[in-house]
Amino acid sequence: MQSRILAATLFVLLSAGANAATLYVEKWGRTTAGCGSRNDPCSTINAAIAQPGFGTNARIRVGPGIYPESVFFTMDGVRLESMAGARVTMLRTPLAGDMVIHAQGDRVQIGRRGKGFTVTGATGNLSAGIRVEGYKPRVEGNIVYGNYYGIRAIGARAQVRYNEIYSNISYGLDCRHCDRGIIEFNEAINNSTGIGVSGIATRFQVRRNVSRDNLASGIEVAGSSTNQYTVKDNVVQYNGGGIGVNNADGAKFQGNLMGLNTHRGMRLDQSTFDKPATVRNNIAMGGPTETSHGFQLDTVGNLRFQGNSAVQNGGSGLSIGAFSTLNSLKGNNFYANGAWSPNFDCGISNASIVEPTVVQAFLGSPAGAAPGPDAQANDNDGHDTICGPQGYVLPGNAYIAKPRPYRANAAARL
């Protein structure tokens, strides 16, 4: 019986391999029927797609040059890659309203590390440089600029790695319904939003990316069905906002470095009422305006806030908004925040109507502490605010002349 199963499995694998063609594209090739071999390549990707050998699990290898075409296919398992890398292999759509690369199919791969494409020109409304739709799409090693969307990956277990994504009109990277997906080692620069995740998406990971100089947010997670995910070891700086989150039930935010973002380092909004979320060992520093809070919580519950550093932000180190609660607040550094604002001159500003129990415990003067005159000033809603000229001494948290050493942030070494 086992020998029959082994034979059947081998037959399926051999059949799949036999059906998987490798087609070649070179600028000096031709577009007529029969092209696509190594010695007789096609001159365009669309010509290769039109060949009888193109089908499930096909591989298209593209030589260096500029290819003015829009590529579209609907086939599973296709691998489209360059032979000499993204810096010498460009795809540019001749029509602004078209996608440059639009693939529909499961397990499709566009580029790979060192074998990707430069992709540009799709500036029409809602068009994209690369759009992949299906189960487990993979986009890797590409340079994507000058499009409306840079990369749009739509499907579970999407893998988007090692791409340079810059100067796109809307999102640099937009990952939708990417349940259990992985977004890592990308650079998103000078887009409207650097990296965005939305839709039905659980247990995905956004890690070790650099997102900077984006107009709105560096990293944005939104949608009522995003939960139990991880945002870890990213460098997010010089953006309009650092990391913005709309739903974070069971999520983990760890080891991120957020610096010099205009509005806030990290904002959690309408999140974490069912499964506890964790914000741990993150650094938010140098926000340049009076609303540049290091961390901002708006209508957030059931949150663990541990081991974070908020340093020299224009607003509060930690701003706790209305209806927000925490179940752990310890081991954090709050230093020299509120430099730009007499209204948010605080290590922690608390405007929560429900007065988080963990924050209530810090009201009053801890032993050895000498709070400033605003230490327990009432806010506009008449609730106590933990606030002082440069911060406030909290049990288990640090208010010291300079921040204590924190664990090295892996993203800073990218």
Image (cartoon, rainbow, N blue to C red):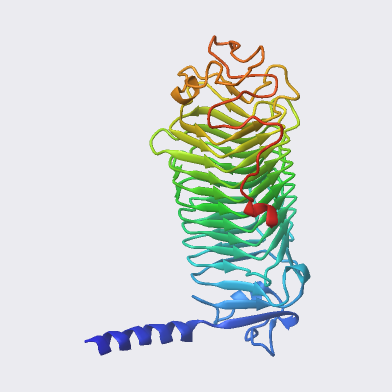
In the foreground, 204 or 399: 399
| Residue drawn at 21 percent across, 87 percent down | 1
Q: What is the count of numbered marks?
A: 0
| Residue drawn at 69 percent across, 84 percent down | 41
Taking 229 as reference, is 326 above or below it? above
Q: x, y percentage for residue 81?
A: 64, 73
Is 201 on the left-hand or right-hand side of 382?
left
Q: In which quarter of the image is residue 301?
A: top left
Q: In which quarter of the image is residue 4?
A: bottom left
Is 70 on the left-hand or right-hand side of 280?
right
Q: Is residue 150 visible?
A: no
Q: x, y percentage for residue 336?
A: 71, 29
Residue that protrudes farthest toward the left in the picture:
1
| Residue drawn at 76 percent across, 75 percent down | 64
Q: x, y percentage for residue 270?
A: 49, 31
Taking 56 as reference, is 155 above or below it? above
Q: In what quadrant of the picture does the C terminus appear?
A: bottom right
In the foreground, 187 or 326: 326
Q: Is residue 268 visible?
A: yes
| Residue drawn at 71 percent across, 24 percent down | 338
Is 319 on the left-hand or right-hand side of 272?
right
Q: x, y percentage for residue 162?
A: 65, 62
Residue that protrudes farthest toward the front in the picture:
368
Q: In which quarter of the image is residue 118?
A: bottom right
Taking 28 as reference, is 333 above or below it? above
